[in-house]
C-alpha cells in the first residue's frame, strides 16, 4: 500500500512572524494542484494533515479559503482523508468544517465519509484501518482530544483485526523542538495534552504501526514502544536556498528563500512472516528518506 501526506498548506494571507514571512502561502493551491497531478492513481489515498488554511480576519474569508482547499483536493482520483488543524478552528466551528470537508470527500464519489458528521472517523482502505483523530484547540493552544473521542478510539481499536495507521494534526510524541522557530519557546502550542494516555491506548491494541501528523513545520521520525511517530514538514515553509529550513531560523529576505513544496510518500510493506516495513520519503526542498521495520 502507498499513500501521500500533505501538511500545513496554509491557504490564505501571508503574514510575517518575527520579521520574516515564513509561510509562503501563495504557493499552496498551485502546489496542491501540481502534486495531485503528479500522484495520479499511484497512491491508494491521500491525507491532508490539517492547517489547510491560514486563519484570516473574518469568518467568510476562512470559509472561502477552506472551500478552495477542499475543492483542490477533491480533484484527486483517489480518496482523500481530511484532518482538522488549529488554524481552521480560529473562526470556523467544527460543524462548519465537517459540512465543507464532508461534501468533497476526495474523489471517492461513491463513498460518503463519516467526516460529514464528525471530525474523527475511521475507514478501511487496502486492508488497513485508518483512524483520523481530532485535536481541538482554542487560540492555537489548550490542545486536547476529548473524553468522548478517547472512548470511541478504544472501541474502534477493538473492532476488526486490520493493522492500524493513525492521523492527527498535533504531535503525540515527545519530539525535540530545539531550534524550531515556531515552538521552541512555546511547547504548549505544540503537543496534545492527552498524548501519553493516547500512546498507551495505541500500544495496548498491539495493532498500530504508526501515527502521522503535521503542525510542527519540521520533519521528524521517532519510535516509542514499537510505534513510529512521523511528522511532515509544511507544504509552504520558507526554505533557505542553501537547503536549510527556516523553521530553524535564517535569512530575513523572502526573495532569498523558496517554499519547501514538501509532501511525503509512504509505502507500507508486509513480508511473508507478517512483519511490516515503512518506507517514508519526504519530497521537496526539505527532503527526508527513512526506512523502518515495525
Image (cartoon, rainbow, N blue to C red):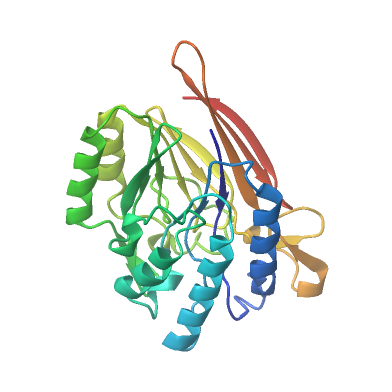
> In the figure, is residue 160 to the left or right of 279?
left
Of residues 73 and 199, the one nearer the viewer is 73
In this rendering, the answer to whether 92 lies above or below 194 is below
In this rendering, the answer to whether 56 lies above or below 5 is below
Of residues 224 and 65, the one nearer the viewer is 65
In this rendering, the answer to whether 81 lies above or below 212 is below
Horizontal and vertical percent for residue 99? 36, 71
Can residue 237 be seen here? The reply is: no
**Residue at coordinates 35% horizontally, 67% vertically from top-left?**
98
User: Which of the 4 image quadrants contains residue 241?
Assistant: bottom right
Of residues 127 and 237, the one nearer the viewer is 127
**Residue at coordinates 82% horizontally, 55% vertically from top-left?**
242
Of residues 259 and 243, the one nearer the viewer is 259
Q: How many marks?
A: 0
In this rendering, the answer to whether 270 lies above or below 198 is above
Horizontal and vertical percent for residue 113? 36, 55
Horizontal and vertical percent for residue 281? 64, 39
**Residue at coordinates 50% horizontally, 74% vertically from top-left?**
67
User: Which of the 4 image quadrants contains residue 131?
Assistant: top left
Amino acid at each position: 500500500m502507498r499513500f501521500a501526506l500533505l501538511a500545513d498548506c496554509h491557504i490564505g494571507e501571508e503574514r510575517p512572524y518575527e520579521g520574516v514571512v515564513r509561510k509562503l502561502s501563495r504557493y499552496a493551491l498551485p502546489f496542491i494542484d501540481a502534486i495531485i497531478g503528479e500522484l495520479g492513481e499511484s497512491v491508494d489515498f491521500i491525507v491532508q494533515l490539517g492547517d489547510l488554511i491560514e486563519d484570516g480576519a473574518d469568518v467568510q474569508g476562512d470559509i472561502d479559503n477552506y472551500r478552495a482547499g477542499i475543492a483542490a483536493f477533491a480533484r484527486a482520483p483517489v480518496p482523500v482523508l481530511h484532518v482538522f488543524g488549529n488554524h481552521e478552528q480560529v473562526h470556523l466551528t467544527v460543524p462548519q468544517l465537517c459540512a465543507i470537508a464532508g461534501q468533497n470527500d476526495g474523489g471517492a464519489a461513491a463513498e460518503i465519509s463519516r467526516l460529514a458528521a464528525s471530525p474523527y472517523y475511521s475507514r478501511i482502505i487496502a486492508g488497513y484501518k485508518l483512524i483520523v483523530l481530532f485535536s481541538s484547540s482554542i487560540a492555537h493552544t489548550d490542545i486536547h482530544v476529548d473524553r468522548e473521542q478517547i472512548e470511541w478510539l478504544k472501541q474502534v481499536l477493538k473492532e476488526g483485526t486490520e493493522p492500524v495507521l493513525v492521523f492527527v494534526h498535533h504531535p503525540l510524541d515527545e519530539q525535540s523542538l530545539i531550534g524550531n522557530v515556531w515552538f521552541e519557546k512555546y511547547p504548549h502550542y505544540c503537543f496534545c495534552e492527552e498524548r501519553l494516555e493516547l500512546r498507551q491506548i495505541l500500544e495496548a491494541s498491539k495493532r498500530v504501526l504508526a501515527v502521522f501528523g503535521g503542525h510542527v513545520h519540521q520533519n521528524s521520525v521517532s519510535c516509542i514502544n514499537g510505534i513510529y511517530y512521523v511528522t511532515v514538514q509544511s507544504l509552504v515553509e520558507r526554505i533557505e536556498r542553501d537547503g536549510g529550513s527556516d523553521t530553524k531560523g535564517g535569512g530575513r529576505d523572502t526573495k532569498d528563500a523558496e517554499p519547501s513544496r514538501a509532501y511525503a510518500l509512504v509505502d507500507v510493506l508486509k513480508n511473508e512472516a507478517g512483519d511490516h516495513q515503512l518506507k517514508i520519503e519526504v519530497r521537496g526542498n526539505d527532503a527526508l528518506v527513512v526506512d523502518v521495520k515495525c
